[in-house]
């Protein structure tokens, strides 16, 4: 764990990988040090934003934390039924060397975990799935990706919460609402949530 | 004219949004804080009216706002000093002070001109704007598409009940927003070591021009090139307002209130929190000079 200053209102904690990030995030979110306002987990870092306290104080508090290690912390489980009819399914099959059926089996066969959210509200970056599904982004971003699109890129899977531009490879879609402003919290997929994809049929 | 506590928008100007102090604590869901770009100016306007500091007001970019009051309302203008005038229902027109408490009688029209310097003017109303909250805030996050819609001609903005406390002063002497050249103190960023050893000196060697590609999300700056030492790809990481992110062009972007929650370009330096408000008042064509703080 290495702590870097991010201006006078935040620290960036560098960690060994997503599992360590989620573990530290869970530990700090459960009992945030005084003055901490936001925690932003990402691929290899946790951003700690604070207000009204000195950076040294927060740094000392973060360094004193002993995140749970070993078994990955899981907060909540979600099953997402997917219709595998995505525009890039055949391309993913070509990139991975798997048949379309094998791509679907790989995507549904291993549970994923939300490492962090970003890009747009409720957009969760899912890790921990089948390593054969590591495909690059599309060379060109689509202007419009429909809400509920289930996609892959750079070792992550995701479900687009709202219509937005996007460069990930589309495998299919779900009708499950991923972002609901009337729900509390509005994001279905939050850091630490375990996600199972199932095939919903055509 | 009714006596409902309502402010009617007759013209929104080029860019007007409702803003409060934003929605902290949701960054882990991909929701940024947003809120007033010049937080101190909104706070001051609210303090003048004895409102809670975080009451919602209008953030008016480059003036142009025209509103009509449907009742007696106390208002205050802060931030960029747009020349303002008030025309009563009887047709008499007079000037309106800046950073001062002013009364709008029923049926009167308040007009904001083009500020001679600064970018964002705040109009606060005693009682605060009572538009619906989204995730605990009345701020419009222009990037995430959250919060109330942008007021347009004909929008009726409800005003909340006046607080129990009364205004104590009717004028706040504040320094004018900088014109021409803004000096911003920066601290070395978390990824300054991804740049050449001279890059931090380059950042402070000459002023940067604020380009027209600037909005509530951030300001693209044009000035000394910031050379990378590490050409690698940075995994996505969390961002803050004031972060100076450097894309491969070598020209920095200064993040403001609606910045993305995470970003993928290295941050060479971060503007001191207390100077981010000042940055938000620099307008296209203005110059920013960075100075390394400690």
Image: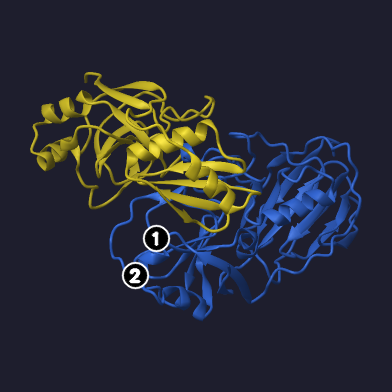
Mark seen at residue B228: 2
- Residue A162 visible in this rendered orientation of the protein: no
**Residue at horizontal 50 percent and vertical 80 percent from the top:** B205
Identify the chain of the residue marked 2, using the numbered disc in the image.
B
Name the spot of residue B196 as percent of width and height, x first. 36, 73
Residue A181 versus residue B266 in the image, above or below: above
**How dense is the environment of label 1, judged by Cα within 10 Å: few (below 14), some, or many (20 and up)?**
many
**Residue at horizontal 52 percent and vertical 55 percent from the top:** B217
Judge from the rendering whether residue A55 lies leftward or rightward of residue A150; answer left or right: right
Q: Secondary structure beneath disc 2?
A: loop
Residue B139 versus residue B122 in the image, above or below: above
Residue B96 versus residue B20 in the image, above or below: below
Image marks 2 and 1: residues in contact by CB distance under 8 Å: yes
Name the spot of residue B213 as percent of width and height, x first. 48, 64
Which quadrant is home to the C terminus of chain B?
Answer: bottom right
Q: Colour of chain B?
A: blue
Judge from the rendering whether residue B8 lies leftward or rightward of residue B185; answer left or right: right
Q: Which chain is yellow?
A: A
Identify the chain of the residue marked 1, using the numbered disc in the image.
B
Q: What whole-number distance in Å separates the C-alpha atoms at marks 2 and 1?
A: 9 Å
Q: Earlier in the sequence, mark 2 or mark 1?
A: 2
Which quadrant is home to the N terminus of chain B?
Answer: top right
**Residue at horizontal 78 percent and vertical 42 percent from the top:** B52
Q: Secondary structure beneath disc 1?
A: loop
Name the spot of residue B252 as percent of width and height, x first. 45, 67
Name the spot of residue A196 as percent of width and height, x first. 29, 23
- Residue A159 visible in this rendered orientation of the protein: yes
Dot 2 and dot 1 within a common chain: yes
What residue did someone put label 1 on? B266
């Amino acid at each position: 764990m290495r702590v870097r200053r991010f201006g006078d209102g935040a620290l960036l904690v560098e960690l060994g990988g997503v599992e360590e990030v989620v573990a530290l995030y869970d530990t700090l979110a459960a009992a945030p040090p005084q003055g901490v306002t936001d925690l932003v987990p990402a691929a290899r870092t946790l951003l700690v934003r604070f207000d009204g306290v000195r950076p040294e104080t927060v740094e000392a508090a973060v360094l004193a934390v002993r995140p749970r290690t070993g078994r990955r912390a899981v907060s909540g489980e979600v099953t997402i039924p997917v219709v595998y009819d995505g525009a890039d399914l055949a391309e993913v099959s070509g990139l991975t060397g798997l048949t379309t059926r094998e791509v679907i089996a790989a995507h549904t066969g291993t549970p994923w975990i939300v490492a962090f959210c970003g890009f747009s509200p409720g957009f969760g970056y899912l890790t921990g799935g089948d390593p054969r599904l590591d495909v690059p982004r599309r060379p060109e971003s689509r202007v419009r990706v429909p809400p509920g699109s289930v996609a892959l890129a750079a070792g992550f899977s995701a479900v687009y919460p709202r219509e937005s531009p996007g460069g990930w490879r589309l495998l299919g879609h779900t009708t499950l609402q991923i972002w609901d402003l009337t729900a509390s919290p509005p994001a279905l997929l939050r850091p630490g949530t375990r996600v199972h994809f199932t095939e919903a049929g055509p | 004219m009714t006596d409902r506590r309502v402010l009617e928008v007759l013209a929104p100007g080029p860019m007007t949004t409702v803003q409060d102090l934003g929605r902290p604590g949701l960054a882990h869901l991909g929701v940024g804080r947003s809120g007033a770009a010049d937080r101190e100016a909104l706070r001051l306007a609210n303090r003048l009216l004895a409102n809670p500091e975080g009451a919602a007001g209008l953030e008016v970019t480059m003036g142009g706002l025209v509103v009509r009051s449907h009742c007696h309302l106390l208002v205050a203008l802060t931030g960029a000093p747009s020349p303002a005038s008030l025309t009563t229902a009887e047709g008499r027109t007079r000037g309106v002070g800046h950073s001062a408490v002013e009364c709008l009688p029923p049926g009167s029209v308040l007009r904001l001109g083009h500020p001679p310097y600064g970018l964002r003017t705040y109009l606060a109303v005693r009682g605060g704007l009572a538009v619906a909250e989204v995730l605990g805030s009345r701020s419009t996050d222009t990037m995430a598409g959250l919060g109330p819609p942008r007021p347009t001609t004909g929008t009726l903005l409800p005003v909340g009940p006046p607080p129990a406390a009364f205004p104590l002063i009717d004028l706040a002497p504040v320094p004018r927003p900088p014109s021409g050249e803004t000096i911003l103190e920066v601290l070395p960023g978390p990824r300054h070591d991804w740049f050449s050893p001279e890059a931090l000196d380059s950042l402070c060697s000459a002023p940067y021009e604020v380009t027209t590609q600037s909005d509530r999300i951030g300001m693209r700056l044009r000035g000394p090139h910031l050379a990378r030492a590490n050409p690698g790809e940075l995994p996505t990481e969390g961002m803050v307002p004031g972060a100076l992110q450097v894309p491969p062009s070598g020209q920095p972007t200064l993040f403001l209130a609606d910045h993305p929650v995470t970003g993928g370009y290295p941050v060479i330096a971060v503007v001191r929190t207390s100077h981010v408000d000042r940055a938000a008042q620099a307008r296209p064509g203005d110059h920013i000079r960075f100075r390394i703080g400690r």
